[in-house]
Amino acid sequence: MSEKGLTNISLKKINKSKVYQYIYRKKTISKLQIVQELQMGLSTVSQNLNLLEQEGLIEKNGFFESTGGRKANALQIVSDFKISIGIGILKGMFHITAVDLYGNAFYTDTIPLPYSNTPDYYKQVTDAVKEFISSRQYDNDKVLGISIATQGITSPDHTTVLYGDIMNNAGMKLDDFSRYLPYPCYLEHDSKSAAFLELWNHPELDSAVIILLNRNLGGGIITNHQIHQGISMHSGTLEHICINPDGPLCYCGSRGCLETYCSANALEQAAGMPAKEFFPLLREKKSPQIIQIWKDYLNHLAFAMKNLNLVIDAPIILSGYLAPYFTEEDIEYLTEHLHTAAPFILDKAQVLVGTNGQYTPAIGAALHYVEKFIQSV
């Protein structure tokens, strides 16, 4: 093929991609708006819209209000044209989520299953994924991929868990799962997956600190609109920041790590009950003991947030399992105590709260393949 022919094909692909991604960003838009805002010719836009509609990528959904002439078609992407599946691996259970092309989780499930480094375990997890897909009668090519978020720091090529003291899963391999699945597969540290979801939900943020308030604490750092991995893949492991050298023993072998004060496990241990029982009692405000346990928790969290904000001057996002339990009053308490003996003020508006709860890492993992797809169209 001539160089000119290749150039024309490349230009057509670029134009098609521009039109699709513009519709994706705007959610709903008219043909004329695309022409005006992308500064493309009407015939070029029409050709690309026809092509995208024929491929099933976009659809017409109603009309805009008339401005004097014929009503314009409202164009939008087909959000369930493809789906992506995320798995969140924990010590005693795993989560399955499925998301559409906007990252909306339309399916979530929790399956009790203690982790074991055995073929039977990996087969049970992947069988649950295949059962979900077959129950919806999805063709294989509808599924973009399966992403696994696990407690454990992964290798730079995302094929192996290098550090996994919580679950004793060091050495877990992507192949342990992928050998049973006819889809692309990806392995990621659960905290990094959570950070990715929060960045997806807050695309306006260039930088942020994510505190993952899961059963075990985690964290993530966003810089330059990307998840910071670090030279050894452990950037953001703020759970092992020492806040009291004489404090409780952490699973890492040190004492007084933030994990021992601000994980959901630490809160439940202090309260002697699960979080789902603790918070209704707390909100009744009848038990001084329950109120004090929560104040102690928030004080330690505020101490950590204050110091993290000195290192990275950016918004702080509270994410994960405990995040949906936080109230406006809790955020006000945190910001008030953040400023105790702190030289700089972190505005309350810069403390954000995630909304996806325990499914945060699994949903964030699933977004890996969604982003790849949107960029590839």
Image (tube, rainbow, N blue to C red):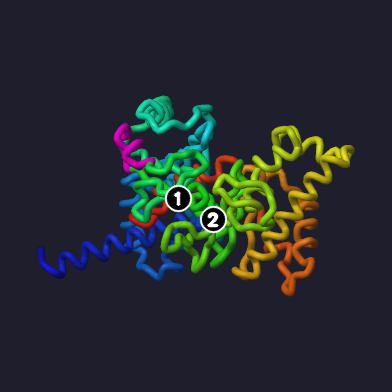
Q: Is residue 176 magenta?
A: yes
Horizontal side of residue 99 vs 353, given as left or right: left
Disc 2 to disc 1: CB gap under 8 Å: yes
Kindly identify the amino acid type of the residue bearing the numbered disc 2. Answer: Thr
Q: Which mark is residue 283?
A: none
- Residue at position x 80%, y 56% in the image: 333
Sooner in the amino-acid sequence: mark 2 or mark 1 = 1
- Residue at position x 45%, y 62% in the image: 230
Does any portion of residue 210 appear in the rendered image?
yes
Kindly identify the amino acid type of the residue bearing the numbered disc 1. Answer: Ile
Q: Which mark is residue 237?
A: 2
Span highlighted in magenta in the image: 172-184
Judge by depth and name the residue closer to the eye, 225 or 101. Answer: 225
Q: Quadrant of residue 307?
A: bottom right
| Residue assigned mark 1 | 153
Relative vertical location of residue 225 with respect to residue 264 in this rendering, above or below = below
- Residue at position x 32%, y 43% in the image: 184
